[in-house]
Amino acid sequence: MRLVLVGPPGAGKGTQAQFIAEHLSVPKISTGDIFRANVSSATPLGLQAKAYMDRGDLVPDDVTIDMVRLRLQEPDASQGFLLDGFPRTVPQAQVLDDILSETDGSKLDVVLELVVDSEEVVRRLSGRRTCRTCNHVWHLDFDPPTVEGTCDLDDGELYQRDDDQAETIQNRLEVYELSTAPLVNYYAGRGVLVGIDATGPVDDVTERAIDALRPLEHSPKRPSHGAADLPPLPDGG
Ligand code: AP5
Ligand code: MG
């Protein structure tokens, strides 16, 4: 399945992406994670992206698109993928369509929107802590580690992302409304959008996501068709 996760910063895209990708047996491709890995190894790409990320702005489309194009050419993505954090602008979405059609004539099967209000997003982002070693994501209130500041999985040090400071969160929300929210209409118009309520416990959200995707999973593989050609989905997408 070729799937895109869309939703505001802190909606739980990364949290859900790992479960959904595992369930579908497809690679999870997170542009934010790829940029952060490049920033921490100080590669030329990381140096280019860092200033934008620290401000909560989008990295320019050309840089991001080249990076995703290369990643999608890797063999593990040939039978499907889950994209987390890409596309994030309408031009990125248009290029993604071109990349798929040039590569093997395929199309996106579904765009899953995680719907959460901005108050909840701020709560989730302000309490997020990430392990420096294994990158596991915790939350101070909703999923706290047993020992403050230490990852339960490997005793790694937990850190707060630079872009999770209050002022940067505000900018990221504004950037989302301006540049990324229009994608919801873009994909709705193409008949591939499915929205789910992403509030409540993580496991409940995962269950809603998998339920919403089930009709697509059980359909015969039709690489050149999108959700518009399939039976109606539970959430009306
Ligand atoms: P990116 O890393 O993609 O950031 P984002 O979209 O702002 O999303 P987040 O990772 O902050 O949130 P999330 O939805 O993954 O939530 P999470 O699961 O962690 O991008 C970072 C930057 O990179 C961008 O600002 C930009 O500069 C650049 N970039 C990336 N892609 C780009 C692109 N395509 N174009 C241009 N620039 C790009 O959850 C958040 C917290 O909530 C966690 O603590 C978690 O434990 C908790 N939580 C999750 N689910 C629940 C739940 N159900 N209940 C309670 N708590 C929950
Ligand atoms: Mg994320």
Image: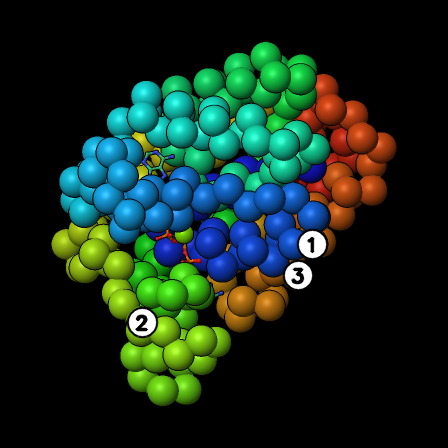
Could you say where residue 229 lies in the image, as x and y percent from the top left? 75, 25
Q: Which residue is mark 1?
A: 23
167 to the left or right of 110: left
How packed mark 3 is, by other alpha carbons closer than 10 Å (few <14, some 14-19, many 20 or more), is some
Q: CA distance from mark 2 to mark 3?
A: 28 Å
Mark 3 or mark 1: name the one nearer the start of the chain.
1
162 to the left or right of 184: left
Q: Which residue is mark 3?
A: 207
- Judging depth in this view, the residue of 122 and 130 nearest the camera is 130
Q: Is mark 2 within 8 Å of ligand 1?
A: no
Q: Element under label 1?
A: helix
Could you say where residue 156 lies in the image, as x and y percent from the top left? 36, 74
Mark 2 or mark 3: name the one nearer the start of the chain.
2
Q: Is mark 1 within 8 Å of ligand 1?
A: no
Could you say where residue 198 lies in the image, as x and y percent from the top left? 51, 57
92 to the left or right of 75: left
Q: Element under label 3?
A: helix
Q: Which residue is mark 2?
A: 158
- Judging depth in this view, the residue of 145 and 177 nearest the camera is 145
Asked where in the image residue 59 lies, by quadrant, the reply is: top left
Q: CA distance from mark 1 to mark 2?
A: 27 Å
**Tags 1 and 2 touching, CB below 8 Å:** no
How packed mark 2 is, by other alpha carbons closer than 10 Å (few <14, some 14-19, many 20 or more), is many
